[in-house]
């Protein structure tokens, strides 16, 4: 069965440091990988998308890498701020079929 | 744009009752998705539509669940009869163009409690 694993433990980092979140997947080849942010009581908000033929994508302080050999994506937030505190979800769409799969998310807390 | 609109925001019902959740996608978006989120299972895709046509309903847990999209601006997810294990937050999301190639826009969710 399809499986997506994100950092199971909550991540606490000091303001100004770089936060790195991990998304590992098994059993299929994703066509696209997406990262979302979710705040308590709200729906996920789309942040970044990376395609299977891309190694890296950047948007302001955010950077996503995609290693199809390792079956892993890393999500980096540089110069982190307390406002970055949230749960971050990765999601994949397989290149066969139309299913979307979400990870269970990693809770990030940026400490002032 | 108002974003994806869902109603109601909260629903409390008794086991055995029918529940109907509603969603209005962002205008111009061709794809509409229904998800369920629980602590144990995370965010699960239930069904999605393209141009009002159901494309994949393999995530619908059982026959008690049904979804419709009668037009481009409205969709419903119905549970009949409801059970306590259906308690979760249900999200509707919409997306333009090719699903997966762009991000999905999520609504605020409906928190369903079945007692």
Image: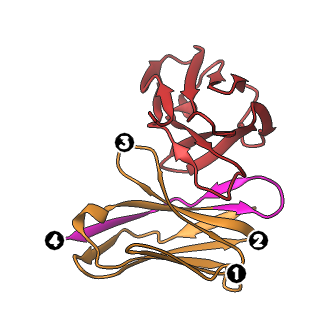
Chain colours: A orange, B red
Name the residue carrying label 3.
A41
Q: CA distance from mark 1 to mark 3?
A: 33 Å
- N-terminal of the two: label 2 or label 3? 2
The correct choice, above or below, for A94 with respect to B58 in the image is: below
Crowdedness near tag 4: few (<14), some (14–19) or many (≥20) residues, C-alpha within 10 Å: few
Q: Are marks 4 and 3 on the same chain?
A: yes
- Quarter of the rendering containing residue A62: bottom left
Where in the figure is residue B39, as x and y percent of width and height?
47, 49
Name the residue carrying label 2.
A29
Q: CA distance from mark 1 to mark 4?
A: 35 Å
Asked whether, in this view, residue A85 is left or right of residue A103, the answer is: left
Q: Which residues are magenta?
A: A92-112
Name, please, the residue furthest toward the top.
Answer: B17
Which residue occupies 56% across, 33% down?
B85
Element type where label 1 sits in the image: loop
- N-terminal of the two: label 4 or label 3? 3
Name, please, the residue furthest toward the left.
Answer: A112
Crowdedness near tag 2: few (<14), some (14–19) or many (≥20) residues, C-alpha within 10 Å: some
- N-terminal of the two: label 1 or label 3? 3
The front one of B4 and B92 is: B4
- N-terminal of the two: label 1 or label 2? 2
Which residue occupies 62% across, 83% down?
A55
The correct choice, above or below, for A34 with respect to A21 in the image is: above
Q: Are marks 1 and 4 on the same chain?
A: yes
- N-terminal of the two: label 1 or label 4? 1
- Quarter of the rendering containing residue B64: top right
Name the residue carrying label 1.
A68
Residue A112 is labelled as 4
Asked if the residue at tag 2 contacts the one at tag 1, i.e. Cβ–Cβ closer than 8 Å, the answer is: yes
């Amino acid at each position: 069965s399809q499986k997506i694993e994100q950092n199971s433990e909550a991540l606490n980092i000091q303001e100004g440091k770089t936060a790195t979140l991990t998304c590992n997947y098994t059993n299929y080849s994703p066509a696209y990988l997406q990262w979302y942010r979710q705040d308590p009581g709200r729906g996920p908000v789309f942040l970044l998308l990376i395609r299977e033929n891309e190694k890296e994508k950047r948007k302001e302080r955010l950077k996503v890498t995609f290693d199809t050999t390792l079956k892993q994506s890393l999500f980096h937030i540089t110069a982190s701020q307390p406002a970055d505190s949230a749960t971050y979800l990765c999601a994949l769409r397989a290149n066969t079929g139309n299913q979307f799969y979400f990870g269970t998310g990693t809770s990030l807390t940026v400490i002032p | 744009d108002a974003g994806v609109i869902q109603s109601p925001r909260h629903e409390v019902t008794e086991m055995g009752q029918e529940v109907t959740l509603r969603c209005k996608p962002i205008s111009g978006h061709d794809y509409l998705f229904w998800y369920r989120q629980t602590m144990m299972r995370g965010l699960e895709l239930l069904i999605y539509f393209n141009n009002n046509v159901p494309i994949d309903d393999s995530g619908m847990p059982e026959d008690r669940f049904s979804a419709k999209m009668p037009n481009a601006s409205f969709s419903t997810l119905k549970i009949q009869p409801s059970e306590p294990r259906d308690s979760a937050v249900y999200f509707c999301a919409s997306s333009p163009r090719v699903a997966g190639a762009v991000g999905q826009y999520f609504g605020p969710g409906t928190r369903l409690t079945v007692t």
